C-alpha cells in the first residue's frame, strides 16, 4: 500500500519513491516525467499566519492540484510546501505544458481570513532516462526546481537546462532519502531503541533519566543529529515520537516496579504537539504502561513557545491534567521571547550545552547562566545544565546555582540493561 501524507491525503515522500520505482520499472518503452513544485516565500506565509495558516494553504493547494490534474499524474507532497507530480507517458513538451498549468493553479488567489495571497512557485522538470533509477530522476527534478528558484522563483526549468550544480546539494538530497527509508525500515523491523542518560542533583540523587532515541538498521547506527531533522522534515517524527512516548513510559514503569522513583524525560517535537492527536497518544502511552504519570516528563524545545497555537495549548493543558510534568529543553538557544516563559507551565529549565562548554573561563557566559538560573528559580523551576563533560564546568555551574547536571562526566546515554546496572552501583533506591 502507498504511504500517504496525513495533511493532504496525497502520497508522501516514501509513497512518491515507491510510485516512481513502479513507473521506472514500467517505463522501458515510454518515458515519464517528474515535476517538482515548490512554493516561493512559503516561509513568510508560515511566519505571518503561523503553522495552522500554512497548513490551510497547503491543504487548499493540494485540493486544487487534485481537481486540476485528476487522473493525469500521481501527486505527492514531499514535506513542507513541496509537491511532486509523476506523469506517465510524458515527453518534455507535454511536461512543460503541464508545468504551466500547475503554475497557473498555484497562482489562483488564496484567502486567509480577510487577507488575499497571490502565491507563485518554482518548478523543476525531469524526463526519465532509461538508464537511471527513480532516486536519480527525483534528484534531477529537485535540482531543476532549485535552478528555477535561483533565477528568482516564479518559473519553470527543465533538467539539463540548469547550470551544473555543486555536488554537495545532490549528496545531501540522496542522504536524506536514504535516511528516510532507513527510518521506515527501523519502524517496521524494530531497529529503534531508547538510551537513557541520568540527570543528577547537586546532592547526588538521580533527578530523572532522559530518553534519547537510537536507530540501528543492518548493523549501521544513525545518530539523532542526522535522523531527527529528516524525520521532522518528512513528518515521520510523529510516528517516531509516539513510539518514543510509549517506550519511555514503559521504561518509567519498569523503573517504578524495580523500586526506583526516577522520572523518565521524553523528547517531544513541535510536529507532535501541533497535532490534535497528541493527547490521545499520550493517554495511550500512560494507559498501556500503567505508570504513575508523575514519573513521566515531556521535554519541549524552547522554539515551540514562539507561537503557541490553541492546539498546542490544549495539548499542554491535557498533559498537565494527566499528571505528567513539562520541561523546557535547550534553553537559551531558541528565539523565544522571555515574556512567554511566564506562561509556560514547565517545572524544569534545561540550559543548553552551548553555555556549558565555555565554562569556567567565559565570564560573560557565566553571568548569563547565573541570570537564567535565577529566572528559572523565580518561576519555580528546577534548573539543569546539559552536556557537562568536565569537573570545572560542573563546579562553575553549581556555584551559579544550577540544581542538576546531565553530561558525559557522570554518564553517557546507555541502553536499558546498562541503566539498571548503573543505578544498582549507585544504590539509589
Ligand atoms: P537533547 O534533547 O538536547 O539531548 C541531549 C543531547 O546531548 C543528547 O544527544 C546527548 O547524548 C547529548 N549529550 C549529553 N551529555 C553530553 C556531553 O557531556 N557532551 C556531549 N557532547 N553531548 C552530550 P543525542 O542523543 O545525540 O540527541 C540529540 C538530540 O536529538 C536531542 O537533544 C533531541 O533534541 C533529539 N532527540 C533524541 N531523541 C529524541 C526523541 O525521542 N524524540 C525527539 N523529538 N527528539 C529526540
Ligand atoms: Mg532533550
Ligand atoms: Mg537539550
Image: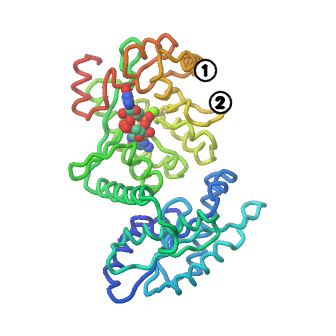
> Can you tell me whether the CB of the residue at mark 1 lies under 8 Å from the nearest atom of ligand 3?
no
| Residue 224 % position (x, y) | 37, 43
Q: Position of residue 77 (x, y in %)?
A: 50, 66
Quadrant the N terminus occupies: bottom left
Helix, strand or loop for disc 2 = helix
Q: Quadrant of residue 147?
A: bottom right
Q: Residues within 10 Å of mark 1 (few under 14, many from 20)?
A: some
Q: Residue furthest bottom?
A: 29
- The x, y position of residue 295, in whole percent, is 40, 30
Q: Are marks 2 and 1 in contact (CB under 8 Å)?
A: yes
Which residue lies under the disc numbered 2?
A: 338
Image side of residue 425 versus residue 156, left or right: left
Question: Mark 1 sits on what residue?
Answer: 375
Given residues 212 and 124, the one toward you in this image is: 124
* Residue 383 appears in the figure: yes
Q: Position of residue 188 (x, y in %)?
A: 29, 57
Question: Which of these two is toward me, 151 or 117?
Answer: 151
Amino acid at each position: 500500500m502507498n504511504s500517504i501524507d496525513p495533511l493532504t491525503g496525497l502520497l508522501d515522500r516514501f509513497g512518491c519513491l515507491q510510485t516512481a520505482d513502479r513507473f521506472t520499472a514500467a517505463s522501458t518503452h515510454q518515458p515519464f516525467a517528474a515535476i517538482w513544485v515548490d512554493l516561493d516565500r512559503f516561509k513568510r506565509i508560515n511566519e505571518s499566519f503561523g503553522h495552522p495558516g500554512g497548513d490551510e494553504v497547503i491543504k487548499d493547494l493540494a485540493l486544487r492540484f487534485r481537481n486540476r490534474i485528476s487522473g493525469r499524474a500521481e501527486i505527492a507532497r514531499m514535506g513542507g510546501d513541496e509537491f511532486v507530480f509523476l506523469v506517465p507517458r510524458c515527453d518534455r513538451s507535454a511536461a512543460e505544458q503541464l508545468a504551466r498549468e500547475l503554475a497557473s493553479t498555484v497562482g489562483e488567489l488564496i484567502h486567509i481570513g480577510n487577507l488575499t495571497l497571490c502565491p507563485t512557485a518554482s518548478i523543476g522538470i525531469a524526463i526519465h532516462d532509461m538508464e537511471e533509477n527513480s532516486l536519480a530522476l527525483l534528484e534531477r527534478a529537485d535540482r531543476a526546481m532549485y535552478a528555477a528558484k535561483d533565477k528568482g522563483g516564479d518559473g519553470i526549468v527543465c533538467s539539463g537546462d540548469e547550470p551544473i550544480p555543486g555536488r554537495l546539494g545532490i549528496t545531501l538530497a540522496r542522504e536524506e532519502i536514504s535516511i528516510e527509508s532507513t527510518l521506515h525500515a527501523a519502524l517496521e523491523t524494530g531497529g529503534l531503541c531508547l538510551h537513557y542518560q541520568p540527570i543528577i542533583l547537586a546532592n547526588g540523587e538521580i533527578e530523572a533519566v532522559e530518553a534519547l532515541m537510537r536507530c540501528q538498521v543492518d548493523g549501521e547506527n544513525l545518530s539523532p543529529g542526522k535522523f531527527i531533522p529528516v524525520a521532522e522534515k518528512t513528518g515521520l517524527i510523529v510516528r517516531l515520537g509516539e513510539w518514543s512516548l510509549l517506550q519511555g513510559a514503559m521504561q518509567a514503569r519498569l523503573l517504578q516496579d524495580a523500586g526506583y522513583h526516577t522520572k523518565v524525560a521524553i523528547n517531544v517535537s513541535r510536529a507532535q504537539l501541533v497535532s490534535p492527536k497528541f493527547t490521545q497518544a499520550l493517554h495511550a502511552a500512560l494507559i498501556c504502561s500503567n505508570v504513575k504519570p508523575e514519573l513521566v516528563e515531556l521535554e519541549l524545545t524552547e522554539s515551540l513557545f514562539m507561537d503557541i497555537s490553541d492546539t498546542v495549548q490544549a495539548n499542554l493543558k491535557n498533559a498537565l491534567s494527566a499528571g505528567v510534568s513539562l520541561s523546557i529543553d535547550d534553553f537559551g538557544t531558541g528565539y523565544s521571547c522571555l515574556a512567554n516563559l511566564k506562561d509556560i507551565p514547565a517545572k524544569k529549565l534545561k540550559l543548553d550545552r552551548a553555555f556549558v562548554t565555555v565554562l569556567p573561563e567565559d565570564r560573560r557566559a557565566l553571568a548569563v547562566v547565573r541570570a537564567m538560573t535565577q529566572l528559572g528559580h523565580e518561576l519555580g523551576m528546577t534548573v539543569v545544565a546539559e552536556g557537562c563533560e568536565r569537573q570545572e564546568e560542573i563546579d562553575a555551574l553549581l556555584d551559579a546555582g544550577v540544581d542538576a547536571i546531565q553530561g558525559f562526566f557522570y554518564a553517557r546515554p546507555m541502553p536499558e540493561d546498562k541503566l539498571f546496572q548503573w543505578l544498582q552501583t549507585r544504590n539509589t533506591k
